[in-house]
Image (tube, rainbow, N blue to C red):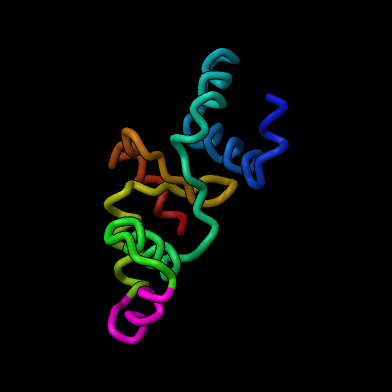
């Protein structure tokens, strides 16, 4: 538990995870803490998320992304990625569960608040 204070943004990510997962026991809350690497709190908007996901997908660097900037609609791509990644809105920001993704039904309900 002490390590969570050492990692930048980890406490907010954990708060978002608790909000999204709604654990019913302290044991489950602790398990979620141990699995924090399976979650990504998204602090950017859809434009930046689109850039990030394209970098991950094609293993591009920042210069490559800058080169594509005038040719690609990163905003639209980012929104499509958020939909496909089942990103959900929590009280503490947007959250993505890496494996397995949040169920689509939960994502649809939670994204309405965006």
Is 3 rendered above or below residue 55? above
> Image check: 76 left or right of 92?
left
* Residue in the picture at 45% in, 59% down: 114
Vertical placement of residue 37 versus 41, above or below: above
Q: How far from the left and from the top, in percent, is residue 71?
A: 28, 84
Residue at 35% x, 45% y is: 107
Image x and y of residue 104, in percent? 28, 42
- Please count the marks in the image: 0
Q: Position of residue 59 (x, y in %)?
A: 32, 60
Q: State which region is magenta.
A: 63-73
Identify which residue is drawn at 28% across, 57% down.
57
Image-quadrant location for residue 54: bottom left
Is residue 66 highlighted in magenta? yes
Of 67 and 77, nearer the camera is 67
Is 77 positioned to the left or the right of 87 in the image?
Answer: left
Examine the image and state in which quarter residue 105 appears: top left
Q: Is residue 11 above or below residue 51?
A: above
Q: Nearer the viewer, residue 53 or 15?
A: 53
Vertical comparison of 87 with 22: above or below? below
């Amino acid at each position: 538990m002490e390590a969570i204070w050492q990692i930048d943004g980890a406490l907010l990510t954990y708060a978002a995870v608790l909000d999204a997962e709604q654990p019913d026991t302290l044991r489950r809350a602790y398990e979620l803490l141990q699995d924090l690497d399976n979650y990504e709190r998204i602090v950017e908007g859809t434009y930046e998320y689109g850039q990030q996901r394209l970098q991950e997908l094609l293993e591009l660097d920042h210069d490559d992304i800058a080169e594509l900037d005038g040719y690609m609609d990163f905003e639209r791509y980012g929104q499509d990625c958020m939909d496909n990644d089942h990103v959900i809105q929590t009280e503490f920001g947007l959250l993505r569960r890496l494996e397995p993704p949040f169920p689509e039904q939960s994502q649809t309900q939670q994204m309405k608040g965006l």
